[in-house]
Amino acid sequence: MKRKFKHMAIPVLLVLATLFIVGCNTENEGIFMRISESVVKVDVGSINLIAKVSGNIYSYASKAGLQVYDPATKNWESIPSAGVRHYTFDGTNIVYATEATFPNNNTLYTYDIDTKVHTTWAAGHAVKAMSPKFNLMLLSVAADSFSVYSAAGTAIGASKADFASEFVDDFPPNLVAFDGSSFLVSGNSASDTTKYSHYYVSGGLPDAMTSSDATFYDNPLVAIGTDTTAIVAIDATGKVWKTAGLLSEFTSTTSITGFPDRNPKNLPYPVFYHGSSLYLQNGDNDFYAVNVTNGAVSEVTSNFAGTFSNIKIKSYLVDPIDTDLVYAGTMENGIFTINMGDGTASGI
Amino acid sequence: MKKVLIVLLLCAAIPMMLFAEDETPAKVREYEMGNQMFTFRAGPVIPAFFFRPFLSSSDGEKFLVFPDAMHMKVGGYGSIRYQGFLNSTMALGGELGYLFAYDRGDELFTSVPFQAKLTYIPLQGTIEIPLSVGLGFAYNSYSGGEAPSFLSLLATVEAGVSWYFRDDWGITLGTGLQLIPEIYGNNHPYSDHTTLAAFMPITLSVTYRNN
């Protein structure tokens, strides 16, 4: 009997040891940790932040349309509008364009956030993209011809950049803004639509962004940052490109791991700029900082990175007064603030 | 006179003896080796606690309890169990279950526990008290983030009260704890996320037994 027990004990111990090893979770940061950090979903959908004015936060929510959110009362209020496709903010008005099938023009409206009055623009435009926070819009102005404008009242102002032959209507380019005056336009090249052309604009004529590395032209650029001396751009695969000085040749530094595949892949990627770095969340919800001066990529270990380990972010908005305060519009969990001063984040 | 008294006493005693036979308690079913039990269980599950022994206090609480701190809602548990008796009080077998619970963000946590189960029944009869321990493992999944999953160890302890409304059929109200460890090695970047999770199913079971 004793001998039988000994024979039984060995396989039992082996099974237990095997179970212990397979029970070691090595693939992620912990299911139960994630559960304990989960937050309530907010039923307005993904939130693309537009502006913060007088304590209210204006946004476009995927399920609810244009919204104004009051953090003090936690009240969401819909801004009446239908079929909103593009939107931006000119400092007084939310300018938005409805759906249109190219080559028909989109109808544009202005919504005054003080008077809450909608005004229809006299002229429509074929809007290809708007930068929600920086009052920029990319229009198709003629066959295979695109221009960037800002809203001025209920009309477009003077052109900020023209692209008469660089892109084609079949593959319209996209607009990726750093601020109201610095942006890039990136899209399939007219000469070879399997490749991409990138142009940088900062108060003057568009400058072609170039590189001796042929892979620079393989993907659209989806994010940009500049410290006014150097430029950093990120392509749709997460590869980081930098210049030594303004518009010198771009060289690749490293790639951001876990960068998500997106469709369409030329959509601007949500980033925010703080302290000479671009901050972004990858597809695994990990945060990375890209140093704009040297292109170095580092994982963010601040407290706020842990807060968002279970929350996907759709957009960012730097507070217009306190630049240490960053608002994060999430995919499903409402709006958070990130305090870059102490590295914390919380829902509002 | 004596004879009359004896006859009267006998007349009184005989019916009493006959009735006394009728009032003999029904024979209590006794288990023996080879008897079997099939059990179907279902009921709500309360996430009881998360214990994170290696977490530094600056990163959060080591011990999170239901309901607010765990960020989990009441879920559900169902299982099937088969056991055979080793002797008159002990039964050994296996249980396959399914546990689910949603977190605060409505992401789904599921666990498929499969375990060896030993049950001791100290009180037997129409009313029984089964006490069980289980050891096995569980396949755990979570729908949030990149939908992680992992296989873990599993330990369970349970107690219940059974009522056999028929000789072969009974129902049991039971509860206990299911312990699921999520273990990270010392060299893992998230080693401090090692967690012992406990769930408390409160189940109503239907048992069929035969011999």
Image (cartoon, coloured by chain):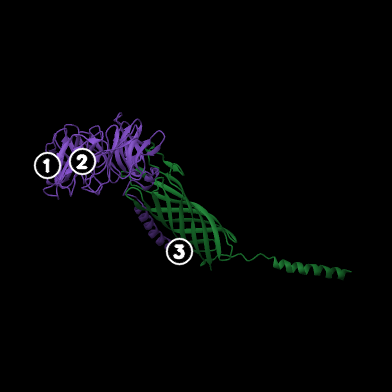
Chain colours: A purple, B green
Give the residue pinned by disc 3: A1
Q: Secondary structure at mark 3?
A: loop
Please state if B201 lies on the left or on the right of B14 as rendered.
left
Residue B84 percent location from the top left of the image: 49, 64
Query: Is B43 displayed left or right of A176 in the figure?
Result: right
Q: Is residue B80 above or below residue A27?
A: below
Nearer to us of marks 2 and 3 is 2
Q: Which residue is mark 2?
A: A138
Do circles 2 and 3 both sit on a common chain?
yes
Q: Residue furthest front?
A: A122
Q: In whole angstroms, how far apart are the C-alphas of marks 2 and 1? A: 25 Å
Quick one: which residue is furthest to the top in this view? A321
Chain on which label 1 sits: A
**Which residue is drawn at the image coordinates 38% and 38% (left, top)?**
A77
Of pointers 2 and 3, the one earlier in the residue sequence: 3
Q: Amino acid at mark 1?
A: Ser
Q: Distance of mark 2 from mark 3, alpha carbons?
A: 85 Å
Q: Earlier in the sequence, mark 1 or mark 3?
A: 3
Specify whether A111 is left or right of A148: right
Asked if marks 1 and 3 fall on the same chain, the answer is yes
Pick the residue in front: B50 or B118.
B50
Residue at image mark 1: A211
The chain letter under disc 2 is A
Circle 2 residues within 10 Å: few <14, some 14–19, many ≥20 = many
Nearest the eye: A204 or B165:
A204
The percent coordinates of residue A203 (x first, y second) are 16, 32
Q: Is the residue under label 3 in contact with that under label 1 (CB below 8 Å)?
A: no
Give the percent coordinates (x, y) of residue B23: 70, 65
Where does residue A89 sit, x and y in percent of width and height?
A: 28, 35
B168 versus A96 height, above or below: below
